[in-house]
Image (tube, rainbow, N blue to C red):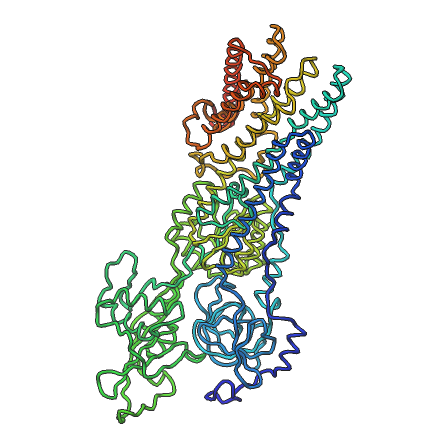
Amino acid sequence: MPDSTAPVSERFHGLSSAQAQQRLATEGSNLLPSSTPKSTLAIVRDVVTEPMFLMLLAAGGIYLALGDRGEALFLLGFVFVVIGITLAQERKTQRALESLRDLSAPRALVIRDGQEQRIAGRDVVRGDLMVLHEGDRIAADALLIDGQLEVDESLLTGEAVPVAKLPMAPNGQPDAALAPGGDGTPGLFASTVVTRGVGVARVCATGARTAVGRIGADLAATTEPSSALQEGSRRLVRNLGIGAVVLALAQVLLGWWWNGRPLLESLLSGIALAMAILPEEIPVILTVFLALGAWRIAHQKVLTRRVTAVEALGAITVLAVDKTGTLTLNRMAVAELATPEQHFRPEGASHLPEEFHRLAEFAMLATPGDPFDPMEKAIQHFGHQWLEGTEHVHDGREPEFEYALSGEILAMTRVFASDEPDVHLLATKGAPEAVADLCHLDAARLDAIRRQVEAMAERGLRVLGVARGRWRGPALAPDQSPPWPTSQHDFDFDFLGLVALADPPRPEVPAALAECRRAGVRVVMMTGDHPATARTIAQQVGLSDRPEVITGAELEALDDAALAKRLRHVDLCARLKPQHKLRLVQLLRASGEVVAMTGDGVNDAPALKAADVGIAMGERGTDVAREASALVLLDDSFARIVAAIRQGRRIDDNVRKATRFVFAVHVPIIALALVPTLLHWPVLLLPVHIVLMELLIDPACSIVFEAEPEDSDTMERPPRPVSDSPFAAGPLLSSVLQGLGMAAVLLGGQAWLVAQGWSGAQGRAVVFSTLVLGVMLLILANRDLSRPALMGVTDPNPWLWRMAAAMALLLAAVLGVPVLRDLMGLALPGMPGLATGVGLVALCLVWLEAVRQVQQRWRSAPTLRQNGG
């Protein structure tokens, strides 16, 4: 057996360089599969090959064929604008992710050919001996064979508290040892961090074969949810495209055969009808609204990695949250001090009572002055905060000797010189039962301490015992070091009390969770931590009133049907493994929920990818979690999630408003293009008229409705149902009715003008002018269906009055400039025409209000029936 006092490189030889090279060539580099940034060409290809954009390109091509270059450039310009927005967002995302990366492949100190060598983490191979020190990030899965360590495994287990690692017994089973979490095990895992100690470990798995790599395999096998909005729009575009082609052909045949028009005029009429039916604004709405929505969400310090997730934000019904780093700060803090007689909690306290000064002092003395371990950092921070200005703070005081934590005694002792000659001061902290054993307490005292510890542990606290002692060594010369006892058991200690630590909740979480509840979003905790800790944090932040917890072991014993039934009554899930979180998210989605999942660890990544909206922590989160997610919180504030949901609901509302407007405004255009052919009237709308209308409709969709402020009840109503598509027949019924009424008014006006003997050019001028003004009425009517259209004119929208001014200028130019008037086939209608137009606009306004009233009564009918009204 190697001499434990000899240098590491003398006690272990390690692999030879030749062996390492052979294994590297055979088994591959120690690298995890990673996602590479999309190329510019790939981004452009993804945008342009969308069916909606193919339709835009086709519509632009039709205009180019007709010689209408202005409208063609306008439509095709949207494609380039959206490509530019997508490129900028993708580049911004990649830059932010690169700056946030903190889990890049570490360098490793290994023993090869009997010498310590610092090599790149990718070159570590199975069988290498790694030398690990405090602060090292472990490069591969390994088994500890020498030394003692404490390791932060939170990215794999979700537990913020480091776990102790002890060497594997000579007859130990390696496979059984390699399970993350748990004190006293020898298993070490890639990407975890050594918080204390020195050790030597033998590498047993690298790259994709590590625990992190297996999670990566689950991640690769997990498919991202498809976008319901895009699927619905594709179906709509396909159906309307087929309908447009059929009706356009019918229009050509009717015009040529039924009315006896020239073939060219009939073709132009058919093309005008096809362009009137094709809703090219739909892709504009979806892409511009979602891209600008991602830009607006970025102002809330939420980075969008998958733009389609912006759509799902408005429909989230379940928010599945990880505990560590999401609900909590992932930073340990002293939560309580306890002596045999009293307890002290920092919350709300103004000073530390005198009876706790000694306990805090010796807890600090038993801790290094500049520690790496998060619990020791918390102890030093607490002591400096509450003992500042007292004689109990001993900064800079160095120990004469130290006894490290060991497998035999789970406590550490630091020995200091005292003012008395040959007398040494002892400061000890560690596992409460180990410290109590060092104090040689009687059975009654031991039982009292055990009850205290159990009560604290039930509240999710990590508890340490603290003791002090005095040891008189033999009289020695000043330059001599005393013969220190071989074991801490050779000292006598006095038990001072207990120090309890916890990962405190984020201060903004309770208010954010309360807002989620008001918005009808159910919050479910999914953590790898202990059930007691999960329950305690849930109570502190107000996550749930239901105390029941389901654990990973219980989850494995249930089939999907039983688990789904159990989930309806449980909000807390603890002791979960990565595959458990993934199963829970998939099960919730299968039951019809729209799931958002938050997390920061590697263990959260598969579930983040499987969720409708995966939300990763940007500051403390791992790069694996960030790359699997759709959104990244740049400042790790939980309140940003609620802000993103609010913004998502606003975007969803505005998409619906714009979609209603598009369908409402297309109905009268289709009617004015189709009906004159059937009634043997002169053509009312030619392609040039429809081009001009599109110059009004497109910016109205992409600018005015996108800038609409959120509704007052945005976060006071339940999420929209998953099946509630803005393209379904139900939501579009009112808009179709709006358009049909306006079409009837305009056609009725045209019939009256024809009967009065007006010329075709004059009638066309009155009808076209009324249609342009009707666009403005439809914008006002669809902003808010809960009140009359004209009541919304004062609501804040920076683009509304600019749009109205643009319409007025356009109408004035078309009627006032002779060249444009002749091009459009219009004639000045005079004062009678003006009066007729005002009357038609008034009738349109009356019709819109009637549709609104009927819709309000229809919506309130179920409520009245439920209340017995």
Q: From what the image shows, is residue 24 above or below residue 419?
A: above
Residue 347, x across and y down, in percent? 30, 57
Pinpoint residue 467: horizontal percent, then vertical percent: 31, 75
Residue 694, image quadrant: top right
Disc tally is 0
Q: In the picture provided, is 657 more to the left or to the right than 392?
A: right
Q: Is residue 249 visible?
A: yes
Residue 751 figure quarter: top right
Residue farthest toward the top in the current orientation of the protein: 756
Rendered residue at 58%/52% (across/down): 610
Report the front residue among 61 and 371. Answer: 61
Q: Where residue 350 appears, x then y in whole percent?
A: 24, 59
Extreme-right residue of the structure: 257
The reply to whether residue 566 is in sight is no
User: Residue sitting at 35 percent across and 74 percent down?
Assistant: 368
Front-most of residues 210 and 862: 210
Q: Is residue 709 left or right of residue 285?
A: left
Looking at this view, name the residue that lies furthest to the front: 819
* Residue found at x 65% / y 42%: 50
Image location (x, y in percent) of residue 682: 67, 14
Q: Quadrant of residue 34?
A: bottom right
The one of 130 and 64 positioned closer to us in this rendering = 64
- Asked if residue 95 is positioned above or below residue 232 in the image, the reply reads below
Q: Is residue 659 above or below residue 539?
A: above
Placement of 117 over or under 503, stated as above or below: below
